Image (cartoon, rainbow, N blue to C red):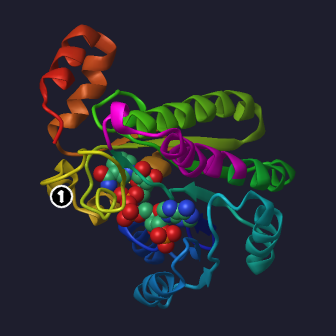
Amino acid sequence: MFAEKTIWITGASSGIGAALARAWATTGANLILSGRRQEMLEQVAAACAPAPCLILPFEATDFDALPSIVQQAIAWKGHVDILVNNAGISQRSLAVDTELPTYQRLMEVDFFGPVALTQALLPHFVQRRGGRIVQIASVAGKVGVPLRSGYCAAKHALIGYSDALRAELAPTGIQVHVVIPGFVRTEIAKNALRSGSGATGEDPVDSGMDPQRAAQAILRGIQRGSPEIPVGEGREMGALWLRRLWPGLLFRQVALRSPS
Ligand SMILES: NC(=O)c1ccc[n+]([C@@H]2O[C@H](COP(=O)([O-])OP(=O)(O)OC[C@H]3O[C@@H](n4cnc5c(N)ncnc54)[C@H](OP(=O)(O)O)[C@@H]3O)[C@@H](O)[C@H]2O)c1
């Protein structure tokens, strides 16, 4: 189902995005790879060979640049079929130590970034009466956890936006997938915004799921047409059920875990 499709992945320079690119490279898809680090994007494109790749670097919060970026993406093959909003940053700081600019940055990158790109590409999908929007959210978008108050807020907001968008687009043939990863072994913790005493030592991400396995699970979910795609192998995935069925127990469990 992906052969000849043009798939645009943000945050393709590392982690889950790079793994998604490599997974899609074997399906006959054309890949647009975005992120800020051109060199890393070139390495990912080389690993995807011989799949056709367009490297399209941009800063996710440079909203003024988006019309031109979107135009370049569409012009490459004449169409974009799947947008994967994967670029993101996390946080490792207690709320009491966190200044407003950190919250603003998290909302800009993790919420307004994917919303702005979705909105900019949406007219193209509407005109073509098709397309898929894949939002890489997080278990932290369903469950509030320590050291990630701004990250959780941004991912909760992204899920709210995406669920509403899915409902609006239902008659159009455009599909919206929300991916809910648990811990995946990437650079996300290393790149997280920090302040005060938060964020030291071993991070659960370091022992998380292999990114390549996560990418395969995401592709299967998209293939099945699943609106929501949980991806993970650890205990954190149980939190999704507890949040729904026994929230009081979940709140006690996350509170018991001392921030590390
Ligand atoms: N790893 C996990 O355990 C986990 C769990 C749940 C959800 N997620 C989500 O998965 C997504 C990918 O994260 P990852 O784990 O693969 O982490 P990662 O290895 O740190 O990758 C993050 C990607 O986002 C890009 N990015 C970050 N800030 C950007 C900006 N301002 N403008 C443009 N691109 C930017 C980075 O590219 P450049 O540095 O080249 O710009 C990089 O390619 C994120 O949305 C994250 O929230 C991860």
Q: Which residue is mark 1?
A: 206
Residue drawn at x 70%, y 54% is: 117
Q: Is residue 189 magenta?
A: no
Measured as percent of width and height from the top left, residue 226 is found at 48, 39
Residue drawn at x 19%, y 45% is: 233
Relative placement, left or right, of 107 versus 187 is right
Measured as percent of width and height from the top left, residue 105 is found at 54, 49
Range of magenta residues: 93-116
Q: Is residue 109 magenta?
A: yes
Please state, as top left, top right, bottom left or bottom right, where the C terminus lies in the image: top left
Task: Examine the image and state in which quarter residue 254 appears.
Answer: top left
Measured as percent of width and height from the top left, residue 97 is found at 35, 37
Please state, as top left, top right, bottom left or bottom right, where the N terminus lies in the image: bottom right
Task: Examine the image and state in which quarter residue 174 appears.
Answer: top right
Residue most toward the right?
Answer: 127
Measured as percent of width and height from the top left, residue 178 is found at 50, 41
Relative placement, left or right, of 252 versus 154 is left
Q: Is residue 11 visible?
A: no
Main secondary structure along the magenta-highlighted residues: helix
Relative to the observer, which residue lies in front, 251 or 214? 251
Residue drawn at x 48%, y 32% is: 153
Relative placement, left or right, of 158 versus 26 is right
Quarter of the rendered image showing ligand 1:
bottom left
Q: Is residue 61 visible?
A: yes
SS class of the residue under badge 1?
helix
- 142 versus 194 height, above or below: above
Residue drawn at x 48%, y 46% is: 102
Relative to the observer, which residue lies in front, 220 or 45? 45
Relative placement, left or right, of 121 versus 148 is right
